[in-house]
Image (cartoon, rainbow, N blue to C red):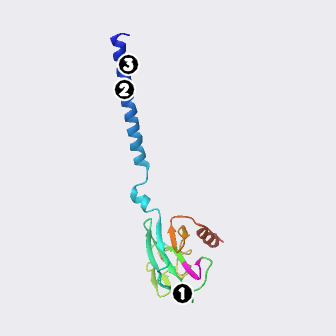
Amino acid sequence: MSNNTNRREFFGFTFAAVAAVGGAASLVGMKQAWDPLPSVLAGGFTNVELSGLKAGKPSTVTWRGKPIFVLKKTSDMEKSDRDLVIGSDRFVVAIGLCTHLGCIPAWKKDVWKCACHGGEFNSSGKQTFGPPPRPLDLPPFSVKGTQIILGEEGPEYKKIAAAMMA
Ligand code: FES
């Protein structure tokens, strides 16, 4: 084999090695660019402990940048097929954005009132007054013991979502 052939092979291998390393590095770079940011991953699921909730006092948590209302109903609040029933307790889980134009309604005694155009939602999240065209929306959730995990579609969510569509 001549010196020229050796040099050609040497440069050929070197080029292939550099190209392989460069290709791998760019794949890593592409994967990093396509993967969701850690903050997005962390924001995908939110656990809410229900056992500490006081009946009649909704709590608001943030899930994927949206307010989520979680209300433990009192015994004199209406029962609804939208209720999440755990043992003898009933809960309402709802996206806290008015279904009219997206303002955040505030809890006043026993209803959510929207200050923007006067819309109202009862303790089950149903629209009872003003311009909102539909009940408060239902976020996907699953139930694990006394917790709900927002962001997962569990059987309880599917049952309530089906009841809301009926
Ligand atoms: S945005 Fe709530 S009533 Fe209009």
* Residue that appears at 43% across and 48% down: 34
In the foreground, 110 or 2: 2
> Type of residue at label 1?
Thr
Q: Quadrant of residue 104?
A: bottom left
Q: Which residues are magenta?
A: 85-91
Specify the quadrant that holds the C terminus. bottom right
| Measured Cα–Cα span from mark 2 to mark 3 | 10 Å
Question: Mark 2: which amino acid?
Answer: Phe
Q: Amino acid at mark 3?
A: Glu
For label 1, the residue is: 74
Q: Mark 2 or mark 1: which comes first in sequence?
A: 2
Residue at 38 percent across and 24 percent down: it is: 13
Earlier in the chain: of badge 2 and badge 3, it is 3
Q: Residues within 10 Å of mark 3 (few under 14, many from 20)?
A: few
Spot occupied by residue 128 in the image (x, y as percentages of width and height): 56, 82
> Looking at the picture, does residue 144 appear above or below residue 91?
above
Disc 2 and disc 1: Cα gap in Å?
A: 73 Å
Q: Main secondary structure of the magenta part?
A: strand
Q: Which residue is mark 3?
A: 9
For marks 1 and 3, give the one nearer the viewer: 3
- Vertical position of residue 57 compared to residue 156: above or below: below
Relative image position of residue 113 (x, y in whole percent) = 47, 82
Which label is found at residue 15? 2
User: Does the stretch in magenta take in 131?
Assistant: no
Structural crowding at the residue carrying mark 2, measured as other residues with C-alpha within 10 Å and reported as few (<14), some (14–19) or many (≥20): few
Element at badge 3? Answer: helix
Tag 1's secondary structure?
A: loop
Asked whether the viewer can see residue 9, the reply is yes
Which residue, as the protein is rendered here, is positioned at the far right?
166
